[in-house]
Amino acid sequence: MPRAAQAQRAFVLAFTTRPSPRTNSASQQLLTGLDLRATGLTTRIAAPVRDAGTRGTAPEDHARVLRTEAEVSGITAARLTLELALAFHHAVLDDRHRLNADRPSRARWIDGEAATRARWHTLVVDRRACLGGG
């Protein structure tokens, strides 16, 4: 599997896989040895996604470092991916203030806003259930 694909797969699995030592190990195996700049940022952003909803993980501190790296490298996609990761964390914690949930979205969704919102809601509810806060 190409290295960039491995990074993307690890990122997706971080959203959809129940956190456990086994899945963390499998995810880490996908990420080991990847060193492309954009891929490296994506793999490091996968960790906060994997830990989303877990209190005490200091995602804002971690995000500040990653945001700076993405801006310095000029990789816009990494910066946007990081914002998605933070939004997921805040949604799982139901932190509406940090999530800006009441702000209208300017995004244009491929499948439409309703379908995207339903998928996002399912991911958040599943993660909350995994964390016991269902």
Image (cartoon, rainbow, N blue to C red):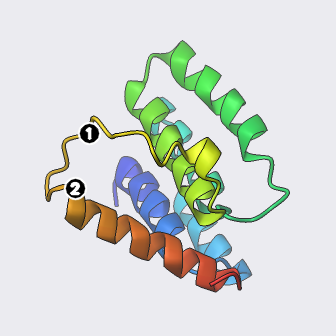
- The residue depicted at 48 percent of the width and 62 percent of the height is 10
On the image, which quarter does residue 35 sit in?
top right
Badge 2 marks a residue whose secondary structure is: helix
In the image, residue 5 lies at what x, y percent? Answer: 35, 54
* Above or below 45: residue 93: below
Which residue appears farthest toward the right when viewing the image?
Answer: 56
Please give the residue where the numbered disc 1 appears in the rendered image. 107
* Above or below 128: residue 70: above
- The residue depicted at 41 percent of the width and 62 percent of the height is 9
User: In the visual, does 74 lie left or right of 29?
Assistant: left
In the image, residue 133 lies at what x, y percent? Answer: 69, 81
Which residue appears farthest toward the left when viewing the image?
Answer: 111
Type of amino acid under label 2: Glu
Which mark, residue 91? none
**Which corner quadrant holds the C terminus?**
bottom right
Which mark, residue 113? 2
**Mark closer to the chain start, 1 or 2:** 1
Judge by depth and name the residue closer to the eye, 82 or 35: 82
In the image, residue 99 lies at what x, y percent? Answer: 56, 46
Type of amino acid under label 1: Ala
The answer to whether residue 44 is visible is: no
* Above or below 53: residue 7: above
Judge by depth and name the residue closer to the eye, 48 or 109: 109
* Above or below 25: residue 78: above
Badge 1 marks a residue whose secondary structure is: loop
- The residue depicted at 66 percent of the width and 63 percent of the height is 93
User: In the visual, does 87 lie left or right of 68?
Assistant: left
Mark 1 and mark 2 residues within 8 Å of each other at the beta carbon: yes
